[in-house]
Image (cartoon, rainbow, N blue to C red):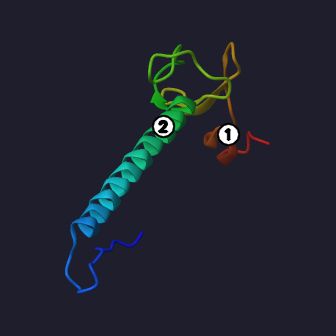
Amino acid sequence: MALFRGTGGSGTSTAFGLLDEVTQQALIAQNASTLATQAINSFDSFDDRYLGSKTSDPSVDNDGNTLLVGALYFNSNENELKIYTGSTWIATLNSASVITGGGF
């Protein structure tokens, strides 16, 4: 977005030109605020789906809300990535089983 300052034909700034610039700056600030809100919402959506590393099966998400079907977390005690089915946590294929040939 280009910024400009209107002139009265003589090349000098006019009150109208300054008003245009202030309006543009306000629009830029509003757009930045909107983008920041969208980024926060995107992170929260990700945070609701991937819960991070935990030592036991969580019963709520990181915000204390109901778990989403398909939510993931890494169980650090069992070294397993787990997925929530809507009623229980199930282990996905873990790297230890792949290395030792226990997977697939």
Identify the residue under disc 2.
41
Q: What amino acid type is highlighted by mark number 1?
A: Ser
Report crowding for label 1: few under 14, some 14 to 19, many 20 or more residues within 10 A (C-alpha): few
How far from the left and from the top, in percent, is residue 97? Answer: 67, 40
User: In the visual, does 39 lie left or right of 28?
Assistant: right
**Marks 2 and 1: which is nearer the front?**
2
Q: What amino acid type is highlighted by mark number 2?
A: Asn
Identify the residue under disc 1.
97
Residue at the location (32% across, 57% down)?
23
How far from the left and from the top, in percent, is residue 89? Answer: 65, 20
Q: Quadrant of the N terminus?
A: bottom left
Residue 63: numbered disc: none
What is the secondary structure assignment of the residue under circle 2?
helix
Residue at the location (75% across, 40% down)?
103
Q: Quadrant of the C terminus?
A: top right
Number of marks present in the image shown: 2
